[in-house]
Image: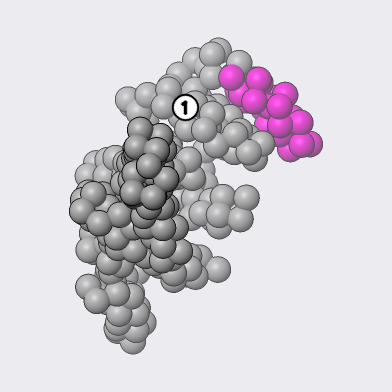
Amino acid sequence: MKWITILSLICIVPFAGHSTNTSPELSKADSLRSIGLLEDAVIAYEFAAYSATNNALRTIALINKADCLVELGKVDQSEKNLARLNYYSLTDSLQYQARYKAALYSYLNQNFEESKSQLQMIEQFLPMALSVNSKFLYALALNETRSWSEAEAQLNNWNAYYNANDSASFKAYHQMITEAYKDKNHPKFRDPAKAQIWAQVLPGSGQLYSGYLFDAAFTATMVLSGIGIAAYGVLVAKYYVTGIILGYGVFQRFYIAGQNRSEFLANKKNYKTKRAYNDSLKELITHNLE
């Protein structure tokens, strides 16, 4: 729940001011949530959304229900719940809250494209005074889709807005972001298709290209073993059919498996490489929230 707590801090300031938009059903749900009865609160918020007399009340009920679901560890259900939101006729502040929460919980559910879509809507249709508060989350979502130049631009936009009158802070933050997002720091990825081709040409080379030496050695050894079994059966033992069948069986199994394994390992290596880089960027970005 660490990242849920940290990222939710971004939401606090822009979301104040909706306490007057309430109903008996919402108040009851809030009371259940305040005493820790989250499962009951989820049901109560759903009823409040169902019986709401206007879209603002319905939106607040669905947002609070989503928050409870996240607190219960049901991030996927929270995202689905917020997909029901209708943004028509909402105030800018409430629309920001709704879209931001939808983006946040999509991000936590690793649905990064949906998160980016919501954040793009915030950027395009809401005032800068509100949308600027979403820049950190936008940058995090862009990082996950390898859109590092766009993420850097989002952080620089935040810097230009909040540090416009503080040249020292502006320069320091700009330098820090520029250094972190330099092209030379961008991770270098393996091509899964190329890994598979290498494995076809020379068994074991696909895994080696993907960065897994022992995996490559094992595949090469087993493929050579298949050839060796066939050669021994034909040339030494004189069991021609048996030797060929056994040898070909071993060769074919590890030759084909090596190709699939090479593609898998290339993707695995890419994920670990991206994860290491993005985690360092995440630490840099969220440091500003502490």
Residue underneath mark 1: 80
Residue 277 located left or right of residue 203:
right
The amino acid at mark 1 is Lys
Vertical arrangement, residue 268 with respect to residue 28, above or below: below
Principal secondary structure, stretch drawn in magenta: helix
Out of 59 and 231, give the one closest to the viewer. Answer: 231
Which residue reaches farthest top? 51
Instruction: Name the colour scheme.
Output: one colour
Residue 85 located left or right of residue 12:
left
Residue 254 placement: quadrant: top left
Residue 180 percent location from the top left of the image? 33, 75
Residue 78 located left or right of residue 29:
left
Residue 83 percent location from the top left of the image? 41, 27
Residue pictured at 71% horizontal, 27% vertical: 39
Residue 116 percent location from the top left of the image? 31, 45
Per the image, is 216 magenta? no
Q: Which residues are magenta?
A: 22-46
Vertical arrangement, residue 24 with respect to residue 269, above or below: above
Could one spot residue 224 in this view of the protein? yes
